[in-house]
Image (cartoon, coloured by chain):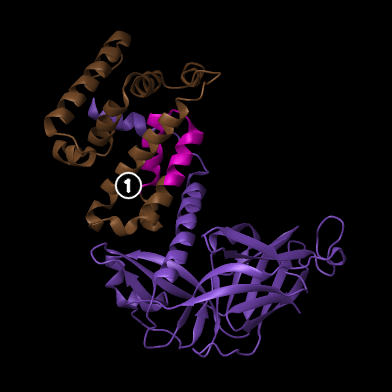
């Protein structure tokens, strides 16, 4: 439990980027806790515990997104970001860009690279994709983010 | 760009419910894990502790007589109700309110494989996955005291903790199992024959009953669980649960 708690905030934030709302993100945290404890015996080495959790998180998030695609939201989620008067504008735009503009595969790589600080080699192993593919997806994602930043002229390089 | 992304993500607010949701997930897995472990285990260890694998059904349902309850569902004679939780054969948790009518819970006796005793107070305990919960109003804390046996908790820990035998002893963790190569260990923590829990924190204490047994399914003496409840106004009440061992079951009723 203590081991998992070290990562629960990371898991929540990663989940939030995918599903864009607190309720689903919390559902994912609960599911990741359940799945990880249930399948702890499949973990090859304790050194991979964090990586293993991140992989479960992304799988759970993807499942939730697929499930939610069948649901029509009455209110677009991005209104949460537009309506908050006191919110730091750079936070609002950057988070919104990350959450709204990137595809799921792009989010995965951006999160693993910049939030979890994995190497490309590790990312390719976690996502089970070729190294070159990981790099090209990240390049594409960063271009999207840079483009958005330039449009609002707030991102420092 | 990279630092900015990390900073931005770290500003996503963490809801207060996060920790509780983690616990819910872990507890669900633990419950299933306990059930699986009991089912898969096949060998009794040399100290002759006997584990009771799973509770797979209430043999005799409690005949809840209206006379035991007030109109709003509270027990007469005491202002709190005691509920016993256990697992069904398919791993689902079920519960039943304890009254003066006997509730018999059938147990499947299985043994644990590859067990290692670090310390331990002795042999001949039968593990059940029965835990108790109290409901009532204005309750501050509850103290459970077993006349015989002890409360135990299934715990999970790392290989780093595993090599720290002093820690294992101080935590009173015994009967450690591990899947080879996983680096993750599971054990049974001795809580003792009594413990006190705050009313609002009962979910955090998944302590289950381990009761004396001689290893040959011979019925032992009844075990009494004293349930002492302290209320926020300083008053207190208590009820006693009689735990009777039967050939392959235990029964619970109010004394």
When asked about the image quadrant of residue B140, the answer is bottom right
Compared across the picture, whether B117 is left or right of B67 comes to left
What's the colour of chain B in the image?
A: purple
Q: Around disc 1, counting alpha carbons within 10 Å, would you say few (fewer than 14), some (14 to 19), or many (20 or more)?
A: many
Q: Position of residue A113 (x, y in %)?
A: 22, 34
Q: Quadrant of the N terminus of chain B?
A: top left
| Residue B57 painted magenta | no
Query: What letter labels the chain drawn in brown?
Result: A
B12 displayed left or right of B69: left
* Residue marked by disc 1: A53
Per the picture, the main secondary structure of the magenta-coloured stretch is helix
Residue visible at 64% across and 90% down in the picture: B221
The reply to whether residue B14 is in sight is no
Question: Which residue is at the front of the view, B50 or A5?
Answer: B50
Classify residue B202 by image quadrant: bottom right
On screen, residue B31 above or below B119 = above
Q: Residue at x 37, y 84 (%)?
A: B45
When the figure is inspected, residue A121 is found, relative to residue B72, above or below; the finding is above
Q: Nearer the viewer, residue A2 or B53?
A: B53
Residue range of the region highlighted in magenta in the rendering:
A7-31
Is residue B77 rendered to the left or right of residue B92? Answer: right
The x, y position of residue B246, in whole percent, is 62, 83
Camera-side residue of B22 and B46: B46
State whether residue B86 is above or below residue A94: below
């Amino acid at each position: 439990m203590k081991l998992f708690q070290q990562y629960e905030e990371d898991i929540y934030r990663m989940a939030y980027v995918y599903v864009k709302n607190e309720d689903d993100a919390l559902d994912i945290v609960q599911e990741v806790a359940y799945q990880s404890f249930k399948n702890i015996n499949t973990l090859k080495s304790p050194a991979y515990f964090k990586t293993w959790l991140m992989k479960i998180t992304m799988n759970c998030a993807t499942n939730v997104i697929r499930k939610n695609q069948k649901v029509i939201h009455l209110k677009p989620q991005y209104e949460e970001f537009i309506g908050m008067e006191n919110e730091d504008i750079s936070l609002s735009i950057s988070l919104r860009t990350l959450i709204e503009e990137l595809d799921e595969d792009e989010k995965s790589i951006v999160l693993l690279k910049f939030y979890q600080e994995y190497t490309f080699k590790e990312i390719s192993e976690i996502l089970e994709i070729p190294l070159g593919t990981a790099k090209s997806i990240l390049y594409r994602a960063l271009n999207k983010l840079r483009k958005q930043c330039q449009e609002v002229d707030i991102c420092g390089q | 760009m990279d630092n900015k992304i990390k900073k931005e993500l770290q500003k996503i607010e963490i809801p207060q419910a996060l920790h509780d949701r983690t616990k819910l997930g872990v507890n669900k897995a633990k419950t299933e894990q306990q059930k699986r472990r009991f089912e898969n285990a096949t060998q009794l260890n040399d100290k002759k502790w006997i584990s009771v694998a799973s509770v797979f059904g209430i043999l005799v349902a409690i005949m809840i007589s209206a006379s035991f309850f007030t109109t709003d569902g509270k027990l007469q004679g005491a202002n709190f109700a005691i509920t016993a939780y256990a697992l069904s054969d398919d791993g689902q948790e079920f519960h039943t309110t304890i009254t003066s009518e006997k509730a018999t819970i059938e147990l499947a006796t299985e043994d644990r494989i590859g067990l290692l005793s670090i310390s331990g107070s002795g042999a001949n305990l039968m593990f059940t996955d029965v835990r108790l919960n109290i409901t009532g109003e204005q309750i501050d804390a509850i103290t459970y005291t077993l006349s015989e046996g002890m409360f135990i908790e299934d715990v999970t820990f790392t290989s780093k903790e595993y090599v720290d035998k002093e820690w294992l002893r101080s935590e009173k963790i015994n009967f450690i199992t591990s899947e080879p190569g996983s680096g993750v260990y599971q054990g049974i923590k001795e809580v003792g024959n009594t413990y006190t829990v705050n009313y609002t924190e009962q979910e955090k204490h998944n302590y289950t009953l381990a009761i004396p047994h001689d290893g040959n399914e011979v019925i032992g003496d009844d075990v009494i669980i004293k349930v002492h409840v302290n209320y926020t106004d300083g008053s207190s009440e208590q009820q006693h649960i009689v735990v009777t061992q039967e050939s392959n079951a235990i029964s619970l009723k109010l004394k």
